[in-house]
Image (spheres, helix red, strand yellow):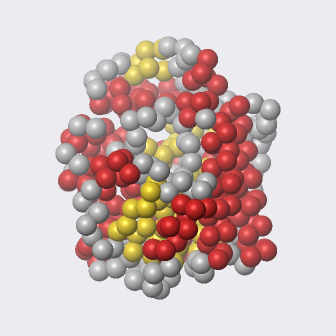
Amino acid sequence: MNLTDSIQYQEDLARVTSLDIPWEQLRGGCLMISGATGMIGSTLIDVLMKRNREAGQNCRIIALGRNEEKARARFGKYLEEESFSFVRCDINSREDLERAGEIYSQAQGASYIFHAASNTHPVAYANDPIGTVVTNIMGLNNLLDFASGKGCTRFLFASSNEIYGENRGDTELFDESYCGYIDCNTLRAGYPESKRAGEALCQAYIRQRGLDVVIPRFTRSFGPALLATDTKALSQFLHKAVAGEDIVLKSAGKQYYSYTYVCDAVSGMLTCLLKGKCGEAYNISDVRCDITLRDLAQRIADFAGTKVVFDLPDEVEKAGYSTATKARLDSSKLQALGWRAQFDIKTGLEHTISILRETGS
């Protein structure tokens, strides 16, 4: 079964499409999404296509990705619709972007670009550290330059809770001005440091090119659109639960993090897009989804009817792990724009597992 055939998933999408946000700003416009087959990008596309069908949004969607086969599997139902286009594109290639630009230039009304392409899990950081940094900086630069030359209405850069680094022990929740320690002389630093540099690059384009940019900072997101190749701890827990296997914890599990169900991540991103202020960053998080890694593993095991076991990671996998022990985000700035999370951690986890079982993912 395709993910979009799941009744539960459609109900979760409906909680986003029915939100009281200024959808009219997207009506008849265009949204280009890099990293379109990733979890957040693909869920955003599902939301927009649902709005198109049920609310006459008439929003043109241009999905960029490197793997056409993966895109066809994920977006097969959309490929015949006029409002949807998939373009095989590596954003590190200006030539590829120019091909995408031929479609983008035909768009009427407001046009937006959402840069969500990035390596986002430990094994990818460890095996492709160059690609991680290059995509987060050079790929971003290519898209920013493209946007500034195409009259883009607003650009969104998908940043991360990783930019905060280590909690210095002076706060419980990170607000958008917090800056903790990152040891830049490690392989693992490529991801958070390049996200920090990416945010600085966005500010440069605002000042020098007059581009309108807003920066949603995502926390550890999860949901039924997660990829089978994702090696983040929570993703592995969920895959084990779906398979009816014990949950493998590769540490003592004392890490205390913020998590976000993907539909809340998307609604937060849309709030940033339609209501945020140029140049500002916004944390997307909810304290009801803050939990230690050990408690998270146990909660998933309890729901799946399995147990938690401990197993140390190999050196390659360990090299990609975050060393942060407490990373909880303050979302009051986003909430001031009217955003509220729709899913607590229990609901998000149960929906994810149930949908993954239903679709055979």
* Residue positioned 35% across, 19% down in the render: 246
Q: Classify the position of the C terminus by image quarter.
A: top left
Please name whichever residue, 310 or 39, is drawn nearer the observer in this view of the structure: 39
User: In this orientation, does residue 282 appear?
Assistant: no
* Residue extending farthest bottom: 109
- Tell me the residue at 50%/25% (across/down): 294
Q: Residue at x 24, y 60 (%)?
A: 77
Say if 191 sits above or below 75 in the image: above
Q: Is residue 141 left or right of residue 270?
A: right
Quadrant (top left/top right/bottom left/bottom right) for the N terminus: top left
Q: Nearer the viewer, residue 228 or 180?
A: 228
Residue at 40% x, 22% y is 247
Q: Position of residue 360 (x, y in %)?
A: 23, 37
Q: Is residue 255 above or below residue 163?
A: above
Residue 95 place in picture, x, y as percent: 58, 62
Q: Is residue 313 left or right of residue 82?
A: right
Quarter holding residue 300: top left
Q: Nearer the viewer, residue 66 or 293?
A: 66
x and y percentages locating residue 235 in the rendered image:
43, 35
**Where does residue 87 sit, x and y in percent of width and height?**
43, 61
Residue 94 is at least partly visible in this image: yes
Eyeballing the image, is 29 above or below 284? Answer: below
Q: How many marks?
A: 0
